[in-house]
Image (cartoon, rainbow, N blue to C red):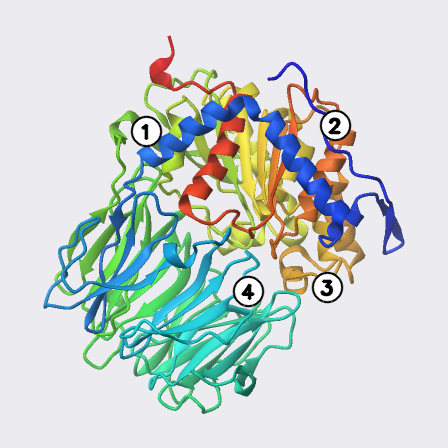
Amino acid sequence: MTSVLPDAPRPARRPTERHAHGDVVADPYEWLRDKEDPEVIAHLEAENAYADARTAHLGALREALVAEFVGHTQETDLSVPVRRGDWWYITRTTAGDDYPRYTRVRDAGSRPEVAPGAMLDGEQVLLDAQAEAAGSEFYSLGGLVPSPDHDLLAYAVDTAGDERFTVRVKDLASGEILDEAVTGVGYGLAFSADQQWLFYARVDDAWRQHQVWRHRIGADPTTDVLVLEESDERFTVWFERSRDGRALVLQSSSSTTAEAWLVDLEDPTSPPRPAGGRRDGVDYAIEWAGDRLLVVHNDGAEGFALAEAPLEDPTAWRGLMTAGEGERLLGVESFAGFVALELRSGGLASVRLIPRAADGSLLVESAEDLTHGGELDTVELDTNPGWEQTTVRYQLTSLLTPPTVAERDVAAGTTEILRVTPVPGYDPSLYVERREWATAADGTRVPLSVVSRREVAADGTAPGYLYGYGSYEVSIDPSFVPTRLSLLDRGVVVAIAHVRGGGEMGRAWYDHGKLLEKKNSFSDYVTAAAHLAEAGLVDPSRLGAEGRSAGGLLMGAVANLAPERFRAIIAGVPFVDALTTILDPSLPLTVGEWEEWGNPVESAEVYAYMKEYTPYENIRAAEYPAIFASTSLNDTRVFFVEPAKWVARLRETVTSDPAERPIVFRCEMVAGHGGRSGRYRKWEQRADELAWLLDQLAATEPIRTRG
């Protein structure tokens, strides 16, 4: 630490009052919400300057970390080619570039033998994202789809970070941009069968994807046609093109209820046809299977079930399979000769293949699971665009297994490994991964995924890092993250706490970590931290924590609940002023979030419960961990004001020594929810966070250099 410390920014206190259910709350920092206010921008810039000053001594470590990230990456690389029609599509990265190039080559009868950096004869560049991003501080794609005859490419670009995209349609023969008139759209693009029309989605002022539109390519967008509108603010809409290209499947869903429609892509101006209806509490998704529909639903099945329905009567579901004990069915993808069912089993992601008979029926009794035998293996479907394909691609990973693309011949039962992501300088034999279980106060067993260097002894002396999320039924599955090697190689034990509120252990795991049981997420995380210490896996005085977005709420909550358990916390784009946000239906996503957190506007019980845990309102005068908070000015999902207010209140309340346990806050001034765009910029951002964490954990030196 530097001997002379700069003063932390102190925003003015301008109390505003919040009134709900007879409760009056004075909030001195709500004025920081207005990003058009020059004083707000000045404060954020002051926070960035303070963060720079407080981390200036870490410059060499940041540079070393970036060098390690680069060193563990084959910078000039490419994806496994994916066949679409008569073309093989490829994604290429080049050393020194932040963004990839998207290319293709004609099919010559077999998968092309491609090499990093060496273009094939006839390989065509479809989109050079590096060139497109030139001059932009931020660049992100929200969709990239070729037309049915592969003459056109439609893609969506965001250069602000607010996840509102401009759609471009490119003629792939001439390279000419034919259309870029449609702006401010959400996620999803799909061509009609005759490729005269393009379907896209729009978001409302609350950033809820609520409409699907049809645009005639080259026409004035004012003539675009509204295809579907969802008026219920709890629901969002999305769509996808069927694998055989005949149908557009539209879905509207909340966290508990769904509805579906079909559009005939061979008659694209026809109205959507209902395909399942809406029943409160029935959550489902449909898959076009050519001659029938497949449905994954929870009607009478907590772990969800698989059903089929005739095209002429989509509501006539006939059961095919129900999730077994400890399973949760997630979704299904259909092909002419088989279907691939994604599910969770035993706390891990898995894929189950079901052959189809000659008449199209599913041979459920012949189903097989794709497994590789690892205790922490995550198996998920990869890109499989071909309706007639007889193989299925999937990805395998774990904490120690780099992303591996494999292909299964469904009829023959054989598997081919197509690619293991190269990780230069990585020797998996140096590390060990394992499953641990912590026991919560109510007797619930909470799983942890743990990885460390082999030589790190379980003697209670190792620094530790614990990641968590625990919301929206999102599962944080074991996966290989190259940047974690910089922690592991400094002796840090890395763990993921799979707390309730996520989906790791099935639907009930989620149900018991939401609404009026949300506090289970926080207590589970503290239980996981205690287990790491009690098992001797980490030094309890050197345990770091991280969570992002809703996981940032987790960080704020556990900092209040058990500040003594953690030495340092990284809170990325943290949802730490949850009650203020969920009380305001005008804010992005709020109404839809009521099914996750409860509705504190209508319910005094929900209001009181949320007020007991929302991080901003429960900071205590106690010694807290050191905290590194980050956000982006243009984040639509979690406004920058939440961490800005949280940090201001932390600094004025906690009793920690600011020299030993600093509270720093960074705000990216041109970025969105994911932070910086581009791999090198993201590496720099990650190095900034991890250098700070390693310094707080006194683990800045690699194991090999310790004397």
Q: Position of residue 250 (x, y in %)?
A: 47, 77
Which element carries disc 2, helix, strand or loop?
loop
Task: Determine the residue positioned at 32% across, 39% down.
Answer: 375
Residue highlighted by disc 4: 164
Q: Earlier in the sequence, mark 1 or mark 3?
A: 1
The nearer-to-camera label among 1 and 2 is 2
Q: CA distance from mark 1 to mark 2?
A: 38 Å
Instruction: Please indicate, yes or no, whether residue 442 appears anywhere in the rendered image.
Output: no
Q: Amino acid at mark 2?
A: Val
Quadrant where the C terminus lies?
top left
Q: Earlier in the sequence, mark 4 or mark 3?
A: 4
Tag 4–tag 2 contact (CB < 8 Å) = no
Q: Is residue 371 left or right of residue 211?
A: left
Q: Is residue 397 left or right of residue 596?
A: left
Q: CA distance from mark 4 to mark 2?
A: 38 Å
In the rendering, which numbered label is found on residue 484? none
Relative depth, front residue between 195 and 483: 195
Residue highlighted by disc 3: 585
